Amino acid sequence: MTPSELARAARVHIESRFNEVRVTGELSNFRRPSSGHWYFSIKDEATQIRCAMFVNRNRFANLQPKDGLSVLLRGRVSLYEARGDFQIIVDHMEAAGEGALRLAYEALLKQLHSEGLTDPARKRPLPVYPKRIAVITSQTGAALQDMLSVWRRRYPVAEVVVLDVAVQGDQSEAQILGAIARLPQVEADLAIVTRGGGSLEDLWTFNMERVARALAAAPIPTISAIGHEIDTAITDYVADVRAPTPSAAAELCTPDVQTMSARIRETQALLVRLTNHRLSQLHARLDNSRARLTSPAGRVQQWMQRMDDLALRAGRAMAQHLTRQRQTLTGLERGLSAQHPERAIRRLHETLTGLNDRAARAMLSTISMRRQQAAALARTLHAVSPLDTLGRGYAILTDNAGNAKTSVHTLDNEVLAHLADGYATLELKQRHPGEGLGATRKEESS
């Protein structure tokens, strides 16, 4: 193998073996040429490794690299073939301390997520009108004062219980855990864990596993309001509600008294209008009922008059019914008398005699009419028959198919001449268009 082939094979093998690596160490030999790329080494007590971070990556770094700085690198292992140098192509660089905290943050968040502690389905709703609010924060911090200012303006009826704790430092974890454990004794409707902004190290207490698990197991609904809007702590994920700032948390958990007062006034006015409308309807129904209501004596008199009317109508109806029945009986008697057998036989005999006479007359009339029609048809047929015409010396010319020829222009070389006693085959010698029978006679006479 040539050196180039060996270097290329080694690079391919190394890159396929190490996909992505994270390395922490101390920067040395840092240089930045005019191209904007960064070239440096990362080392510990025993080893140093060359590194390259190209401009499309190093422009996103949020630190100024210099020799002696402890950093955390993320990248891929490769080989610079031109010199055969083993190196790391760096994609991301951050300070070593913050990088370790970030890794721990991501690992804990992933674990809590796998256990379902960040699942939105387990989140509890906040009470609409809380009477007592527990605030776990530093009593001297600005976050508490911001929240109290919001509550004085929006919801001054709320009772606020402050559980004073250290929000950073060595004692903060134990104090916050103790405050969460005291929530059942406080008998609050909800709890808020909050503090102002700071660096990742300042906010780290709220990224600790014990604090996150204790807040997730709190017996009442919880709000996490850690830092500013850009800050996100582990407690923000496990709490029932996450607020971007302490002031926002104060607004989220309480209604606005002025809005409530306006709504109450609107509801009261609506209730008055509905009540007045309902009273008007009831008064109208009462007036209608009074108008329809009559005394018992008058009601009895009406029923007595009604009974007399019904009795009179019943008598008239019975008399009419009897009259109709008598008329029906009389009609049935007349019909039965008319259906006597002797009368029916005599009537049928007369009908049969009349029909025989009519049939005979109709037959004679039909025969006479048919004879007259036959004679007329015979005369008509004789008048249109060509036989008489042929008998006077005329002939009919046709072709062999029997089609009549009426013009000299349509004559074939051979035609058939039909006479009174037969036909003859003629051959055409000459045509004389425009010269009819009259023209021939004139020539003969001349």
Image (cartoon, rainbow, N blue to C red):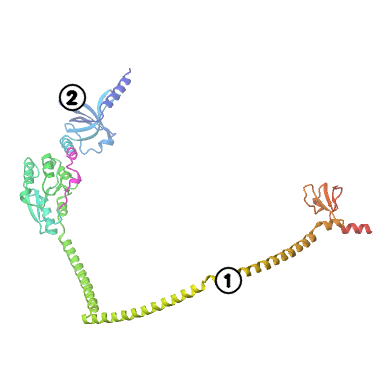
Separation (CA) of disc 1 from disc 2: 149 Å
- How many numbered discs? 2
Q: Which image quadrant for residue 35?
A: top left
Q: Magenta stretch: residue 81 in it?
A: no
Q: Which image quadrant for residue 346?
A: bottom right
Left or right, residue 304 beside residue 211: right
Residue hosting label 2: 47
Residue drawn at point x = 31 percent, y = 79 percent: 310
Toward the viewer: 89 or 316?
Answer: 316
Residue hosting label 1: 346
Name the image quarter holding the N terminus: top left
Secondary structure state at the residue bearing disc 1: helix
Q: Can residue 17 be seen in this snapshot? A: yes
Toward the viewer: 417 or 187?
Answer: 417
Secondary structure state at the residue bearing disc 2: loop
Residues shaded magenta: 109-126
